Amino acid sequence: MKELSLNILDIAQNSVKARATCVKIEITEDADTLAFAITDNGCGMEKDFLANVTNPFTTTRKTRRVGLGLPFLKMEAEMTGGSFEITSKSEKEYEDHGTRVFASFNKNSIDFIPLGDIVDTICTLIHGSEDIDFEFSHKTEEKEITLSTAEMREMLGEDIPLSSPEVLAWVRDYLTELY
Amino acid sequence: MKTLAELSAIRDRMKNKIAVREGSNETRIVVGMATCGIAAGARPVLNAFVEELEKSGLAGEVSVSQTGCIGMCRFEPIVEVMRAGEEKTTYVKMTPEKAREVFEKHIKGGKIVTEYTKAEGLN
């Protein structure tokens, strides 16, 4: 991937497929490190699947037997000297089921991929899954940017879908201004 | 300064429009957004369509949606256009610029941009 924000989009789509109703995307940054965590309350994974989930030949897709989303992210993080972590609780075993993917990157590494257009990623996620609550936060040393679609829904009421072009245009302008 | 409160203004503005919108989407634009599509550049393509749709005010007749892997990863970003009374058109190797052109010529103008379709793109 050319931007880490594309990895975030890719991984968050897994949460959507896992039937999550709430997906949290948290980015934290200081001078040397960028880290993000994507946490959902979806169906989770069982131990056997989880153990092999960063293997490219593990996938849920039906069109072929290769899945590259998590392996890409793990490689990109480790290349910079950062770390990758995935934990999950399957709905078959736990009440509080869900999955958390965490990756951290050393920003000074030559292999560090820039975050890129995170606003575009958030707009894409809201567009694709209007019924899911997304909680986004990006904390740097100077500021913290947040967006909660649950709060947006309160202002919008029940009848206006979050995926309406007018609402998405507002999201884009709102976040762009904060950055 | 943009505020959350503006959303209630959007709500009031859209209230009357939204009832008309439902179920009347005659044209559907579908963008492949699996790992393959995203890596090939599908995200800006999708958002170009969403922006053009917002500008055009055609949200009642046209919808933009996302789908998973269409199964031809080497042709990503792939965009499918379904219009009433027309066979499905598959555009391959799309860019935001091509997307804006397709919106103008095909979605608004009704003329397929054949040079970006699958049959042509295969060569």
Image (cartoon, rainbow, N blue to C red):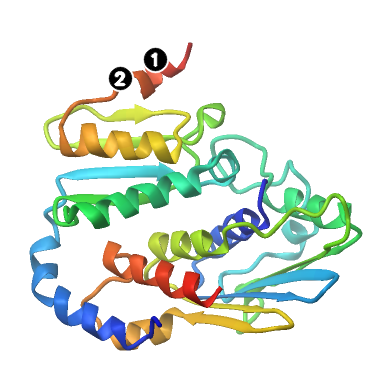
Cα distance in 3D space between marks 2 and 1: 7 Å
Percent x, y for residue A92?
Answer: 62, 72
Out of A146 and A129, give the one closest to the viewer.
A146
The residue located at (51%, 71%) in the rendering is A20
Q: Is residue B108 left or right of residue A29?
A: left
* Secondary element at image label 2: helix
| Residue A127, image quadrant | bottom left
Q: Residue at x 39, y 15 (%)?
A: B120
Residue A15: quadrant of the picture: bottom right
Q: Earlier in the sequence, mark 2 or mark 1?
A: 2
The x and y percentages for residue A154 are: 33, 88
Q: Residue at x 20, y 49 (%)?
A: B62
**For the residues bearing labels 2 and 1, Cβ distance under 8 angstroms:** yes
Residue at the disc numbered 2: B114
**What mark, if any, has residue B120 been given in the picture?**
1
Drawn side of residue A141 relative to residue B48, left or right: right
